[in-house]
Amino acid sequence: MSEIQIYGQFPLKGEISIQGAKNAVLPMMAAALLHRGVTVLMNVPVIRDVSCMADILEYLGCRLERQGGCLAIDASHIENTAVPDHFVSAMRSSIVVLGALLGRMGEGSGCYPGGCLIGARPIDLHIKVLEGLGAEIREEEGHLFVCRGSEGIRGAELHLPYPSVGATEQAILASVLSRDVTVVHGAAREPEIVQLCDFLNNMGAVICGMGTEHLMIQGVDGLHDSSFRVEGDRIVAGTYAAAAAAVGGDVLMKGIKPSFLHEPLRLLERAGARIRTEENAGRIQVSMDRIPCCLDICTGPYPEFPTDLQSPFMALLAAAQGISHIEERVFEERFATAEALCAMGARIRISGRRAEVEGVRPLRGASVKAADLRGGAALVAAGLAACGETRISRCGYIERGYEDICRDLSALGAQIRWIKEDGT
Ligand code: EPZ
């Protein structure tokens, strides 16, 4: 795995464009399986998880062509309906491919995605929605086999006890080509869900209620060729905004809708940053010329504070003034990065789902390991604010979701670079 080297305390100044959203493009790629033809996606980020999803689609029989940020998917012929284990274990979100295979082919199978560093991540709600739509599911030796029941995939009234993003995506993908109407009560409201529905409607689906907790999907017989532009990644933008607030500076981010980050930007203003936004132009400006103030943060489903920004904001608060409190209400194990931050001088006490963060200035550079995707990005933010040299290993995690964090931040004046495996 590659390493990142940072020399800290250089304020971030300048402007960058934000990559396309990982958590929007992955379900869209799975949804392309529903159409016996060509689907073109634009502003697709060049990240490992997209490559993994592309490998899955090719294995299933799709033909893909990529040129820069454009990805064309021809799903005219599907030859397989079993997703190989190594894909599912490499990327949990491949579980939504099952819903698309069920909708298109009437069957699909894959291994049970295991838990990971941020929690057990069960799939009981995925199974609930698929069975609610009339699918038969067999679990055998860690594998899930899903197929149409005797009455086929029919519309249903589904009730989600928790607004699971993945389970909402599963319900949408499995019901787009079903007969009659499906209503999902308690649906996730994330911007990525809204984009998935807009993308599918652009392909000829009939979905309404997106962005609310009641989604309605009217099944259709088929979809048509289409092209669609993926919106900017709100978690990447939120990570960079937290980094700018931690080290100081003045950063303009382009290609990102400020409304996607309402709660994180509100908290950054409370921490002392000056935030200027232009919704139609898709721009966010973050200026910070003071020591950040402490905050109390509680994560939750959209529009609450996103769990994916919890670690980057913990890094910011580790270098703030005063004592902050973070409550992680979405995943049960998402404080793994606290240990590495403490190695950089942070004072963090964890108790169950709560963290108390006593700001220390400056943090000190150290050699640390990334524990997961967003935790790795948080260590980058901490390294920018710390004095001296920070080296972050196991950065393969970061490459899963950030196109090139070193490219983006060095364009803003950070002293940051990749260290290749041969040490150069
Ligand atoms: C999506 O994961 C995102 N991943 C995650 O981003 C994000 O953190 C999460 O939504 C919450 O916003 C992608 O979109 C690829 P959930 P997902 O189902 O769908 C529990 C990143 O860093 N749950 O909303 O897996 C679950 O354990 C990643 O980009 C069940 O109990 O999230 C968790 O506690 C990390 N049973 C909560 O719901 C289920 O069947 C939220 O999970 C499903 C979920």
Image: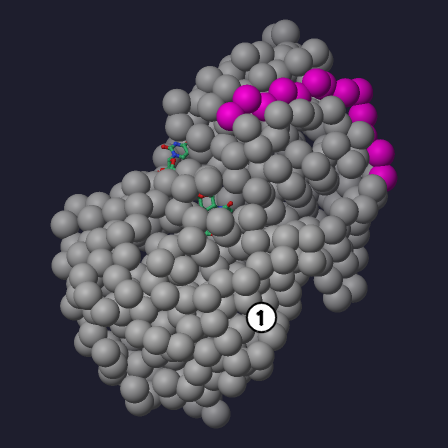
| Mark 1 neighbour density, 10 Å: few (under 14) some (14–19) many (20 or more) | many
Expressed as whole percent of the image width and height from the top left, the position of residue 175 reads: 64, 22
- For image coordinates 30% across by 61% down, the residue present is 314
Magenta segment boundaries in residue numbering: 213-225
What kind of colouring is applied to the model shown? one colour
- For image coordinates 66% across by 13% down, the residue present is 181
Looking at the rendered structure, the secondary structure element under dot 1 is strand
Q: Is residue 308 left or right of residue 355?
A: right
Using the image as rendered, state which of residue 337 and residue 316 is in the foreground.
316
- For image coordinates 47% across by 84% down, the residue present is 414
Magenta region includes residue 221: yes
Q: Is residue 404 left or right of residue 35?
A: left
Image quadrant in which you'd find residue 171 = top right
Look at label 1 and name its amino acid.
Leu
Q: From where the camera sits, is residue 327 visible? A: yes
Expressed as whole percent of the image width and height from the top left, the position of residue 77 reads: 80, 38
Expressed as whole percent of the image width and height from the top left, the position of residue 242 reads: 41, 65
Q: Is residue 206 left or right of residue 145?
A: right
Using the image as rendered, state which of residue 249 and residue 387 is in the foreground.
249
Q: Quadrant of the N terminus?
A: bottom left
Residue 77 vertical position relative to residue 284 in the rendered view, above or below:
above
Q: From where the camera sits, is residue 47 visible? A: no
Residue 359 vertical position relative to residue 261 in the rendered view, above or below:
below
Q: Which residue is mark 1?
A: 252
Expressed as whole percent of the image width and height from the top left, the position of residue 383 reads: 35, 78
The residue most toward the bottom is 424
Magenta region includes residue 383: no
